[in-house]
Amino acid sequence: MNYYAGIDVSLECSSVCVVDGSGRIVREGRVASEPEALIAWLGSLGFSLERIGLEAGPFSQWLYAALREVGLAVELLEMRHVKAALSAMPVKTDRNDARGIAQLMRLGWFRPVHCKSAAAQEVRALLTARKLVQSKFYDVEMSLRGILRGFGLKVGCTTPKRFPGRIREWVSGHANLEAIAEALLSVHDVLLRQLNGFEKRVRAFARSDARVRLLMTTPGVGAIVGLTYVSAIDDPARFKSSESVGAHFGLTPTKYQSGETDVTGRISKFGDASVRTALYEAAHIILTRSLKSSGLKSWATKLAKRTGMKKAKVALARKLAVVLHRMLVNASDFVADKSTSRVRTAA
């Protein structure tokens, strides 16, 4: 008899359900959301498990790595598939979710998700922290501009280094505004120093990674785009075809076909939004900046004349996703003449 388990992970405790090959519940329980506790609970069953389902989430990668390390057949499940499969349940509880995940593992009706390596997760954490500090830095600057604008004081165009001096110049002689400005400028100064520190660390990571340096030979791809893409791909071999990468990051159109109805919609926007944003920004740079001539820019420029600039940028972002993956697989630099051809060698 084969046995299957489903784990619904929460912050403190996780609900676990074990079913047999016929779907009968064998054992249920609530276990602390710690690798040692889950391993001990599963080990106390007295029989081996064919598959263990773990829904992707904040704790999932940590727990998945620990369960895999001790030899358990755990699978990381795609959240949207699990949500769709369990949406028919009238009552949603952690216990019912664990039961539903166990049944999905028994039936094989699930899509496994790649668990990123520790190195890829560290790079992603660095990029996330940099983006957070950058957004707060801009928030403080725009808030200061907005406050002064209410008093008719227009800061105008300036640089990050000249910005504090411009603010102090405008608020001079206004006691309340001086106090507000000094408080916010002190925060602004700290955020600027930390942002510069993150920028140096990001570039150091890019220089030390041969894959990122390889991708940076592509026009429009810098350290941020390269690191974002490499950390998201992690293992290029997990994609059977380079052409599937565009769909993986939500850069392909949705499709609805039923009977006489056949509608092609906008891009799906599934997958990693940060990669989609990075690729779109790279496409924007290629199309709007004066770069070395390449097949990518020529192809996208012709497309923009027919469909418009926005659609051309999305199409170019999708093509970049394919080209960059092929570069990682072949460990080859960017070749302009080959960039516009459809990549089929991995199909």
Image: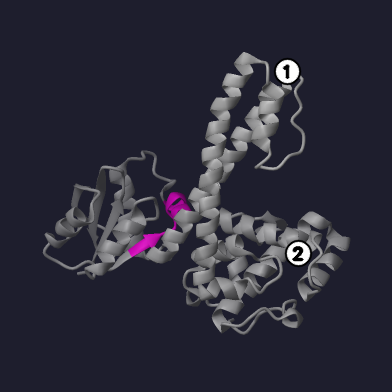
Asked which quadrant contains residue 49, the reply is bottom left
Q: In this rendering, would 71 be left or right of 121?
A: left
Q: Position of residue 172 (x, y in %)?
A: 68, 21
Tell me: 146 left or right of 25.
Answer: right
User: Mark 1 touching mark 2, by CB under 8 A?
Assistant: no
* Residue 50 left/right relative to 141: left
Q: Magenta span: helix, strand or loop, mainly?
A: helix
Q: Earlier in the sequence, mark 1 or mark 2?
A: 1
Quadrant where the C terminus sits is: bottom right
Mark number displayed over residue 286: 2
* Pointer 2 local density, CA inside 10 Å: few below 14, some 14–19, many at least 20: many
> From the viewer's perspective, is 28 left or right of 234?
left
Depth check: give the residue in front, 313 or 141: 141
> Is residue 83 a member of the stretch shown in magenta?
yes
The N terminus, quarter of image: bottom left
Residue 330 or residue 150, whichever sits in front: 150
Is any part of residue 50 visible from this angle? no
Residue 146 visible? The answer is: yes
- Magenta stretch, residue numbers: 75-85
Residue drawn at x 67%, y 36% is 163
Residue sitting nearer the eye, 177 or 329: 177
236 lies above or below 177:
below
Mark 1: which amino acid? Phe
Colouring scheme applied when the structure was drawn: one colour
In this rendering, the answer to whether 65 lies above or below 274 is below
Q: Tag 2: residue type?
A: Ile
Residue 151's label in the rendered image is 1
What x and y, as percent, mark residue 306?
A: 87, 62
Is disc 1 placed on a helix, strand or loop? loop
**Relative image position of residue 230 (x, y in whole percent):** 53, 67
Name which quarter of the figure residue 170 lies in: top right
Per the image, is 342 magenta? no
